[in-house]
Image: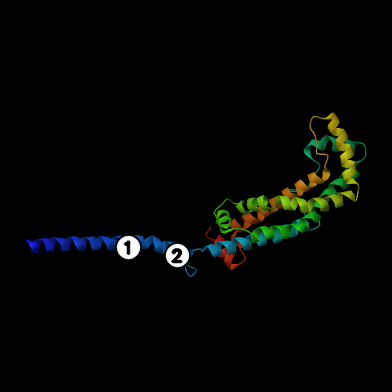
Amino acid sequence: MKFKLLFLASIAFTNSFAQFGELKKAIAKPLEQVKSITDPKSDSLTTNDVIGGLKEALNKGIEKGTTQLSAVDGFFGDAAIKILMPAEAVKVEESLRKVGMGNQVDAAILNMNRAAEDACKTASPIFLNAIKNMSFADAWAIFRGSDNAATNYLQKQTTAELTTSFRPIIEQALSKIDATKHWNTLFTNYNRLSFNKVNPDLTAYVTEKALSGIFSQLAIEEQKIRKDPAARTTDILKNVFGRN
């Protein structure tokens, strides 16, 4: 009887050991998968890969975008972001042109765009500082996000500082031709008679348009790197965004 009990116990122990072995294999498999994600020697992406690739992509997009916009005709020569009179002021502009003030209107439009181009020269350090302070969680969210996730991140992180930087430069540029004075006088009077109000603060209007233009350009550069293999000019960009 004892021999029979010992025999049955041996079988049970053997079965339990076999089950433990299977369980060990089941546990080991996902651990290997985790290792393949985090091991720098693996073919899979690591957190450092993503952070490095994303920062390089952003630096590249910022450098190209800000250089383009801060050049002469960066705004004025680009129909997509050229700063024009606000839609509410179209009738005012038409009236001014009819009474022979077309040259003054054209000069004001040119000056608004030149002011935006000058302001964009200060943008790069602000963007680079935001990238430097990016967390791991932010980087992964951007990497896995939409085609303009990085642009949205930068817009959220830098708009207040860019506004502070842009406004005095734009204000100084506009004051060279007394644009601010004439704008304030013209549209303050216009607003008294119209239900469609125009912002009488020309500096604020141009600052807002300059910010809109620079983020539009960054979105274009971001999409190029995400979608166009030819835009990935370094190994890390090819490695990271070639798999995204």
List the residue tagged with mark 2.
Answer: 36
Residue 79: percent from the left, percent from the top?
A: 76, 48
The amino acid on which the numbered mark 2 sits, given as a three-letter code, is: Ser
Give the left or right position of residue 147, taking residue 23 as reference.
Answer: right
Give the left or right position of residue 97, taking residue 129 as reference.
Answer: right
Is residue 24 placed above or below 93 in the rendered structure? below
Tag nearer the camera, 1 or 2: 1
At mark 1, the secondary structure is: helix
In the image, 179 versus 217, the foreground residue is 179
Q: Residues within 10 Å of mark 1 (few under 14, many from 20)?
A: few
Residue 51: percent from the left, percent from the top?
A: 58, 62
Q: Residue furthest left?
A: 1
Q: Residue at x 92, y 36 (%)?
A: 99
**Which of the 4 quarters of the picture holds residue 227?**
bottom right
Quadrant including the N terminus: bottom left
Q: Residue furthest right?
A: 100
The amino acid on which the numbered mark 1 sits, given as a three-letter code, is: Lys
Residue 119: percent from the left, percent from the top?
A: 79, 54
Q: Residue furthest bottom?
A: 41
Query: Is residue 6 at all visible to an observer of this figure?
Result: yes
Q: Residue at x 88, y 47 (%)?
A: 107
In the image, 67 versus 137, the foreground residue is 137
Residue 185: percent from the left, percent from the top?
A: 89, 38
Query: Is residue 78 at all visible to an observer of this figure?
Result: no
List the residue tagged with mark 1.
Answer: 25
